[in-house]
Image: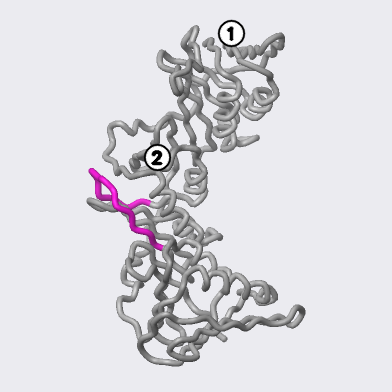
Amino acid sequence: MDFIIQKKLFASLVSEVVKVCPAQSVLPALTGLKIEAGENGVTLTGGNAELFIEKTIPLQAEGETVLQVLEQGSGLVPAKHFAELIKKLPESIRISLKESQITVASGDIKTKLPGFSDAVYPELPDFHVMQSIELPFGKLKEAIGQTVFAVAKHDSKPVLTGVNLLVERDRLICTATDSHRLAQSVVSAVSTMAESFVVPSRALSELYSLKVPETALIRISNNSQFAIFQCENTILYSVLLEGMYPKTESLLPTEFVTTIVLNTEQFRAGIDRACLFSGEWKHNNVQLEIVSQDQLKIASKSTAIGELEEVQNIHLAEGQLPVQMTFDGKYLLEALKGINSERIMIGFNGLMKPVLIRPENHHSTIQLLSPLRA
């Protein structure tokens, strides 16, 4: 293996891949960065047994030659040390692997690192033979942002620590729940499969942070072990979570005793302010009270800091009044951050029944939140 590549581009892509490589592993190969130089470019692969990222560098980018492959081949290099070295080199880099030794040269600088065979590296599935679903990366990123925060943070029920991806003919339904709240986002897509699988939240967080254009199409495939996300020159492989995901559709109410419509940003800012005074409570208690047809009161208090009370206008109210309930302020704030709409609808169904929050005019984003006992 022998190739010459632009330093800035290479350092950036190596950093993106190496961040998922463990410093130590029972499988030593996973502490390495796999480098493959082929006829059409160089491919970098890193992973930790549960999550792998693969990036391919083409010979040209934006009409400029960024890579010259002098000799094809592949091998593993110590991931963390290699990434730190590449960042500190001054200019174009030449990398060669011969007799289990990686030589890295840049200008007058020449370094050598131990290399080893990639024959022991885990074999990743071929997504080309699988059925798939395709949608713009920006839409998937938005759906992740609207749901991933609601996964369970403890693994007493491991399947709840991930987001359920339900693929239907023309849409992707992303659902997350920790049994106290539920977040769901529905996205239009083009699909050749109809399946349901659960992806760990960490993998989706890595996917969310990928540096690819939001308009680029992302292709999602899966087999019994992996979910595969392919977008432009990047592929992310995630091991699936095992277990039966709960049937959540029956949890979503369609009729309400009381509904109100509020300005989203104003309400979000009010809850954010209330959270400043709710920290001493185990569940960040924030109280909501519909005091009249056109007014909502938000209140929170702290014995050490003080208390907050503010009144906001209600654009529309229907059903039984008054209503007074207490919620986890941070949960409520996270739910509101996932809604991109000028106005929201909040539906109530009784004192201790979960409330449903969604955009006023569509159901593509749904947040369900259980109240706290006062």
Q: Residue beneath label 2, please? A: 229
The answer to whether any part of residue 18 appears in the image is yes
Q: Residue 284 magenta-drawn? A: no
Q: Secondary structure at mark 1?
A: loop
Within 10 Å of disc 1 (Cα), the crowding (few <14, some 14-19, many 20+) is few
Q: How far from the left and from the top, in percent, is residue 118?
A: 51, 21
Q: Amino acid at mark 1?
A: Glu
* Secondary element at image label 2: strand
Horizontal arrangement in the rendering, residue 157 relative to residue 328 (left or right): left
- State the colouring used for the structure image: one colour
* Up/down of 310 relative to 145, above or below: below
Q: Quadrant of the C terminus?
A: bottom right
Label 1, on which residue? 99
Left or right: where 182 falls relative to 267: left
Q: Residues within 10 Å of mark 2 (few under 14, many from 20)?
A: many
Q: Are marks 2 and 1 in contact (CB under 8 Å)?
A: no
Displayed quadrant of residue 303:
bottom right
- Label whose residue precedes the other's in the sequence (2 or 1): 1
Between disc 2 and disc 1, the foreground one is 2
Q: Nearer the viewer, residue 138 or 252?
A: 138
Which residue is depicted at the point 44% across and 39% down? 213
Gap in angstroms between the C-alphas marked 2 and 1: 35 Å
Q: As shown in the figure, which amino acid type bears the numbered disc 2? A: Phe
At x 43%, y 82%, the residue is 353
Percent coordinates x, y for residue 212 in the rendering: 46, 37
User: Magenta stretch?
Assistant: 184-197
Q: Is residue 28 visible?
A: no
Q: Nearest the camera: 136 or 124? A: 136
